[in-house]
Amino acid sequence: MPLSATEAAILGDISLDTPWELVETFSRMPRWLPEEVNIGADAIVERLKKLGIPVDVHEPSIYLSVPISASVTLGGKVLRAKPPSMSVSAPGGVEGELVYLDADEEKFRSYTRDPKEIFKDGGVDGPTRVGGKIAILNGFANPGTCSLLEEWGAIAAIAINPGVDIHWGTCTTVWGSPDLDDLPRKPKIAVVAVSNPDGQSLIAAAKAGQRARVSTELIEGWYPQKVPVVTIPGSIEPDRFVLVHGHYDSWDVGVGDNATGDATLLELARVLHANRGKLRRSVRIAWWPGHSTGRYAGSTWFADHFAADLDEACVAQINCDSPGCRWATSYHQTTAMTETRDHVAAVISEIAGQMPVFKRPNQAGDYSFNNIGISSYFMLSSTMPDALRAEKNYYAVSGCGGNIAWHTENDTLEIADRDVLMTDMRIYLLSVLRHANADVLPVNWRAAVAEFLATIDTYAKAAGAAFDLGPSRAAAAALAARLDALHAKITSGTMDQRRVNDALMRLARILVPVNFTLEARFRHDPAYALPPLPMLAEATTLSGAEPVQAGFAKTQLLRGQNRFTAAMREAVRVVDGAL
């Protein structure tokens, strides 16, 4: 889809001057401790005010866990370590026998909690092997695996990172600041990460039946943190808005994760404010604290406190994390919900001359709006081509454009690239412009429901005769037929645009939670991966299950199918109301 004259003119306003100055400033400014994070917010707000852009600065108290130090003592030798956020603080140390579990590093990184996915032996006899011991496994200290080890009775956990550097991270499954229902899932064991060379010595010690001591020190509690939000009003539908956002806290100075994203948001604010008369709908731009040390606590606070506004008026949310990093010239891992992929593909094709390869959004990256039901795209946009990553012998990470400086002290100024940043800023700006200015919102619900049908077919095949998913398939097929009729009406131009857009937004409120959540609306699911249509995914466990367990699974699956078919009927009513 070629650029319109208006789009070309607005894209022509982008400059590197303002964003690159912020990247350079943040490259000298750690944004980790609570007071440092607020200083980072002040730097963003100062620049917005100098540009004449109105900004609201909220200051909520959010729950943070900030790593200070850690170590592993083995046979009198002290090994360097880092505790992930939300690890239990144990400065006096936890001592125990070591046990090694052979894990698949790629699956370990994916935040799954399924032992069959994580461990090469499927986690056989996990509780028996791990109970009362310090568990060692290769990969990153992620929430799903750490919570599983705790459930199995481990007294501490050591993650062996893939390289010579140690990566910061988080090990809690709690999304955002905990509420009373979340507290039982708050981590109760000490967790650390170590380098690969040190990890090999620990593996050898575990095989020899040796003991070790894990020590951690963190500060934890409720801290006031600043949330800057810019609202650029639209001229036709100012009551509706696109939300584009990213985190400004970091590990150390965090240039690629996420100073470049903060700079992109600042430049979007500058350009869109200057061109605000050309916006149909409003655009809100927000910078979050608490991403790294609060497990998305800043964006979760915003989702909680502005839930009604988001529910009524947000047409899409766009996450901006780790754009503009060196060597990140490929878009083969572009995050987008299925209904937004046509829109995103057209933008990336126009700006970068590439057809992106899409991935389902992880339960990560400040996607704190799934339970409200908001169509979403981007998280990590550009990344390093696979061939280049292989040439450099880099392992997979979750940011910095594929640079293994991610979540380390090495994420400094050289990780940012001016040319890549310019390309990514243009992609973000055009994405926002087209979503804000489209007559009919650029979402393809027919594609999403086609995906639902394919998922149901996969689950039905796995279940076989053990469970009938026919009602789910029939309900989704009925919605698909009504969406075909709606698409025909949109294509013909014989529709009330406001009424159609109302329907497209209401469909998001129904269909996004169905595809990405198990918790009720306005709550937050745990921070580990869920499969598509998660309320139906129990169908994959029935084959070979022993009778008692199969009965429990079928009961859960029946309730999930009831939820799903009810959602499909509600969606049909929404579409019929627009026809």
Image: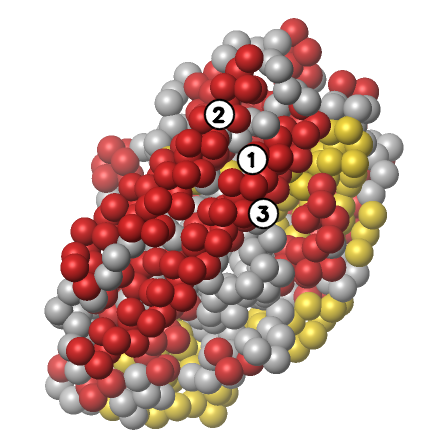
Task: Calculate the distance from the C-alpha at mark 3 to the C-alpha at mark 2.
Answer: 20 Å
Q: Check contact, mark 3 vs mark 2: CB within 8 A.
A: no
The secondary structure type at the circle numbered 3 is helix
Residue hosting label 3: 509
Residue 500 is tagged as none
Choose mark 3 or mark 2, whichever is in front. 2
Q: Which amino acid does label 3 sit on?
A: Arg
Residue hosting label 1: 575
* Place of residue 198 in the rendered image (x, y in percent of width and height, measured from the top left): 27, 71
Q: Residues within 10 Å of mark 3 (few under 14, many from 20)?
A: many
The one of 102 and 77 positioned closer to us in this rendering: 102
Note whether 13 is above or below 307 in the view shown: above
Q: Earlier in the sequence, mark 2 or mark 1?
A: 2
Task: Calculate the distance from the C-alpha at mark 2 to the C-alpha at mark 1.
Answer: 9 Å
Q: Residue at coordinates 16% horizontally, 89% vertically from top-left?
A: 209
Q: In which quarter of the image is residue 160?
A: bottom left
Q: Check contact, mark 2 vs mark 1: CB within 8 A.
A: yes
Horizontal relation, residue 39 to residue 14: left or right: right
Q: Quadrant of residue 463?
A: bottom left
The one of 113 and 509 positioned closer to us in this rendering: 509
* Place of residue 264 in the rendered image (x, y in percent of width and height, measured from the top left): 62, 35
Q: Which of marks 3 and 1 is nearer the N terminus?
A: 3
- Can the viewer see residue 178? yes
Q: Which of marks 3 and 2 is nearer the N terminus?
A: 2
Q: What residue type is labelled 1?
A: Val
Residue hosting label 2: 485
The secondary structure type at the circle numbered 2 is helix
* Place of residue 497 in the rendered image (x, y in percent of width and height, measured from the top left): 67, 23
Q: Residue at coordinates 56% horizontally, 20% vertically from top-left?
A: 490
The one of 21 and 239 positioned closer to us in this rendering: 239
Q: In which quarter of the image is residue 106?
A: bottom left
